[in-house]
Structure formats: C-alpha cells, structure tokens
Image (cartoon, rainbow, N blue to C red):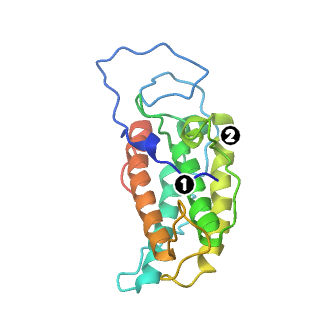
Amino acid sequence: MSTPDDSATSTLPSSPDASSPDSASDTSTPPSASDTSSAAPSPAISTARSLPATRVDPPPMAGERESLDAWIEYYRETALRKIDGLDAEQLCTRSVPPSALSPIGIIRHLTDNEAYWLREVLLDDEQPDPHCSEDNPDGDFEDIEPATALADIEAYRQELDATRAAQASWSDLDGPVRGLRHGEHVNLRWILTHLIEEYARHLGHLDLLCEVIDGRTGE
C-alpha cells in the first residue's frame, strides 16, 4: 500500500454560491453540494435514532496510552455518526469545485489510513491498496460512485475490526515498530498521535460537507 496522501484535501468545502449559474448536469459524475436536482432517494444507512450509542467520551484523567486509544476510538465512532442516515447519493456528494471531497471519499481515505498505519507500519504487514495506485494516487477521493458507497462503509467497519486488534496487540509506545515510514523508524506513540490528527482534520471536512447536504451540524 502506498503512503496515504492528503494532497487532495487541501481545499476546504464551502457553501454553494447562490449567485452562480447552475452548471449543466452530468449524470456520469457524482452530484456536487450545489446540485439542486431532485433525484429519487437512494437507500440510506441506519438513521441517527437507530445508531447504537457506542461512542464514549475519553476519560479526563487517563494515562497516556489510555488517552491515545480513547481519542482514536472516539473519532472512529464520530466518523460513523456524521454520515449516519445519508443515502448513497448523498454520501457521494462532492464539495464545490475544485475540491474532490465527499463524505464517502473521506471514509475511504480513513479506511486506507487505518490499514497503512496500524497494519502495514505497526506490524510490517503489507496490505493491498484498494483505492489508489501510482497512476491514480487520489483514487480514494476521486473514484467514488453511489453503487459502491454502502460497501465502502462496510469495508471501513471491517478494517476497524482488524486495526483495533493490531493496535491492542502492541503495548510499547516508545520503541520502534516493525515497519518503516519513508525508510525511517517510528514508534506507536507517533502513529497514534498522527491518526488522531488525521481524524480531527477530516471530521472537520465532514462537518462542512454534511451541513451543506442536509443541514446537520455538530457532533
């Protein structure tokens, strides 16, 4: 798997400009947040009312490892809460151009990051790259479609099962892990801290995208 690249996420989504003329509709690409066409709704994932209450606030007086684990888990659950109730079309709704960001693209990107850092780097367990390649380094964000959106969410859930187990299997925060990052050693503290940063960044993107899609805000 190639190193996850955030280069496609530098443009923050924004609300559509009401003064701009609507662009011609293109059914070959996912809808954008400024698309006001009324397509038939696609099947949605579970609604917020039926989503299990599994998110737990990180303990305020925990030690270092407990805090790192708790914050990552909190953000994992938050990612699922933010997209809960969106149908397949909404999951593929992009921000305004030139950004390629969409809710499902972010979930695909987080899936790849989980696998890369907690299986490939932590355990030196080479993983196939399901979305990106040398010719298409931003495939996680760009190659999205409603037909596979719900499967992408399930793939994220399955990857979390694997990476939670990998994370729990390694107790030492200080020593080098088995794999390398760009040819250099890192420790688990660095990996977990980076993943917290990665989630915090992309959950902010999800906030903006979801507010444009259906008006939801907050956590």
The circle on residue 141 is none
Between the residue at mark 2 and the residue at mark 1, the CA separation in whole angstroms equals 16 Å
Along the line of sight, the residue nearer the viewer: 82 or 29: 29
Residue 130 at what x, y percent from top left?
Answer: 68, 47
- Crowding at dot 1, Cα within 10 Å, few <14 / some 14-19 / many 20+, comes out as many
129 lies above or below 134: below
Q: Position of residue 16 (x, y in %)?
A: 35, 28
> Which of the image's four quarters has the C terminus?
bottom left
Residue at the spot of label 1:
110
Q: Nearer the viewer, mark 2 or mark 1?
A: 1
Q: Confirm whether residue 112 shows in the render.
A: yes
- Displayed quadrant of residue 209: top left
Name which residue lies at 61% across and 48% down.
Answer: 45
Disc number for residue 148: 2
Tell me the amino acid under the disc marked 1.
Leu
Left or right: residue 188 versus residue 170 is left
Image x and y of residue 197, in percent: 41, 61
